[in-house]
Amino acid sequence: MSDVIKLLPDSVANQIAAGEVIQRPASVIKELVENAIDAQATHIQIVLKDAGRTLIQIIDDGVGMTETDARLAFERHSTSKIRTADDLFTLHTMGFRGEALASIAAISQVELRTRRHDAQLGTRLIINASQCESQEPDMCPAGSNFMIKNLFFNVPARRKFLKSNQVELSNIVKEFEKLALINNEVEFTLMHNGNVMYKLMTGTFRQRITALMGNSLDQQLLPMSIDTSLVKVQGYIGKPENARKRNALQFMFVNGRFMRHPYFHKAVMSAYEQLVPEGEQPNYFLRFTVDPQSIDVNIHPTKTEIKFEDEIPIWQILAAGVKESLGRFSEVPAIDFNTQDAPEIPAYSRHVEVHNPEIAVDPSYNPFKTSGGSQQRHHAPSGQAMSNWDELFANFERKKREGLEQNAGNQPGDGDSQPIVDTGQQSVHDAVLPMGDLQSVYLQLKGRYILSPAKSGLMIIDQHRAHVRILFDRYISRMHTGDMASQTILFPEVLHLSASQCVTLQGLLPDMEKMGFALSPLSGNDWSVAAVPAGLDGVDINSMIHQMIDSAENGGIPLKKRIQEHLALMVARAAAIPQGRSLMQEEMDILVADLLRLPEPNYTPDGKTIIIVISMDEIIKMF
């Protein structure tokens, strides 16, 4: 039983790129699980409390450590994985820098119990903020048991910047997915606050994908296999019809290590050209196997950016392999050239007489008949159904004229007071428009802005932001009065989420239900949406909820007292009139009137300008 962990000489340590700074609990789990995999563990158990703030425990059945190795492992640049600088270019392990345990021990309280399989007795080591407090013999199972307690207890500033438990747990699950996907020969168990989130048994790569991402994905995968002297690529790609607008499941691994490689991603996307709509992304799970000497993983702290020596030929091999898999396995309808017993379909001819009087067409009919030098659009005759068109049109014009005259009679007189809008630049009197004889006139610019003459000049309104402001105030008012109505969906929407998104959604669920949403879990990571807040007609519910989850993951969930405002703003953004949509005069009239009735019409809830007024003096100066 010999010691295997050694301190690296300075000449080697200086050639190693800086290691990843421990920023959040997910960083700790990534480093410790990678160490367990390098230790040839076949079962890894992860136990969390409070999303890792209170406790992160990693239990493995790997080779374990001797008493000397256990103590030396927490020194910086101490490792069993490399000995010389040349070893950096022949790496077969996940870790190699020897910095992870030292970084973790510096910002937490660590307890390690470990024993080698050929030893009768193990060791128990306690370290507090890099200071070794005790080390003693211990009867413990073979392998290693790391307990990381009170993360950032001695760095209050770093601990304060941790996000909510739901966000931190979501990041942990993302790291867990990457590690569990590629190591399908290892059993994984993930527990949080006493609840088992995942229990993954050993199996094939495909079985591990479906166990993590949901059984519904099994029918969407196409196998792919490339074996060349330069690279070996195996895995699965998604069918084109299952491409997603957001949250596509895209994973690339090289030699058992997760990587981000935009260049190879473009190779995959090039094979899907004209097969998926613009803006959608296919799923893929690809494993690359290359000579370790042809890649460099020592260029980024997270080790996810990999430099390949032969990028261009691998790009071509990858693109060709994806195209071949799509062509071989995609279900493309075949063309039947068997004409036996097939009905005869006569070819169209303008000289053939049509016997059905209901669809007869005058051969001399010209839909763009020229009259007086201009083209006038005419419609084909359609029988008696439209014989009274002139009468219908006359009635329509009469009712329209009567409505406009009635509306004009209800307009305020010259002596009536007009609303005043403070835009932050100047007051806008008569912001509802000086109207003509019968109706107000608005001009829409580029489908984005509404232009309106005001007494002081020209008022410009951002239509999307205006609608966001209106909807936000409406939702907040209803939530405060408890009058938030729900609208049942006739055919419930199905949400396909990742495991990390499920964690975030569960944190948002109580306040979403107060807003009028009704969601229930299905099998795997799928959810059913049975009801939404009233007034969201025509809104893509699936996309809206995904945006809410993305916003919560990227920006964090705000303080408890502001969660409802945060959700109301996200729903308002999703439901608001999009940029580029053309509006009718009546729609613009209602939008401007609703906006100017609000107590704060000038800015969106997040502080963006809605109304700008260009004064007459500024307009005169322009000329």
Image (tube, rainbow, N blue to C red):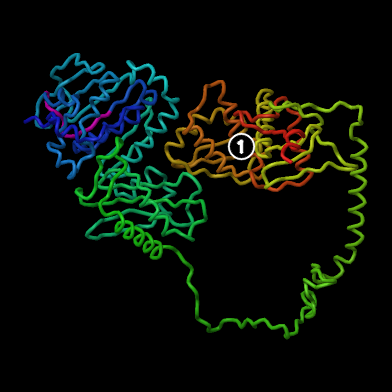
For the N terminus, the quadrant is top left
Q: Position of residue 433 (x, y in %)?
A: 81, 36
Image quadrant of residue 107? top left
Q: Which residue appears at 38% of the width and 29% of the height?
A: 195
Q: Position of residue 30 (x, y in %)?
A: 30, 33
Rendered view: 109 above or below 312: above
- Residue under pointer 1: 573
Rendered view: 621 above or below 75: below
Q: Which residue appears at 35% of the width and 62% of the height?
A: 320
Q: Which residue appears at 38% of the width and 48% of the height?
A: 262
Q: Which residue appears at 31% of the width and 25% of the height?
A: 56
Q: Position of residue 48 (x, y in %)?
A: 34, 26
| Mark 1: secondary structure | helix
Instruction: Provide the residue span drawn in magenta.
Output: 58-67
Q: Position of residue 554 (x, y in %)?
A: 47, 33
Magenta part mainly helix, strand or loop? loop
Q: Nearer the viewer, residue 566 or 261?
A: 261
Q: Is residue 358 shown left or right of residue 299?
A: right
Residue 61 falls within the magenta-colored stretch: yes
The count of marks equals 1
Residue 562 falls within the magenta-colored stretch: no
Q: Residue furthest left?
A: 1
Q: Nearer the viewer, residue 279 or 373?
A: 373
Q: Is residue 613 shown left or right of residue 250?
A: right
Q: Is residue 346 shown left or right of residue 454?
A: left
Q: Nearer the viewer, residue 131 or 607?
A: 607
For the C terminus, the quadrant is top right
Q: Residue furthest top?
A: 133
Look at label 1 and name its amino acid.
Answer: Arg
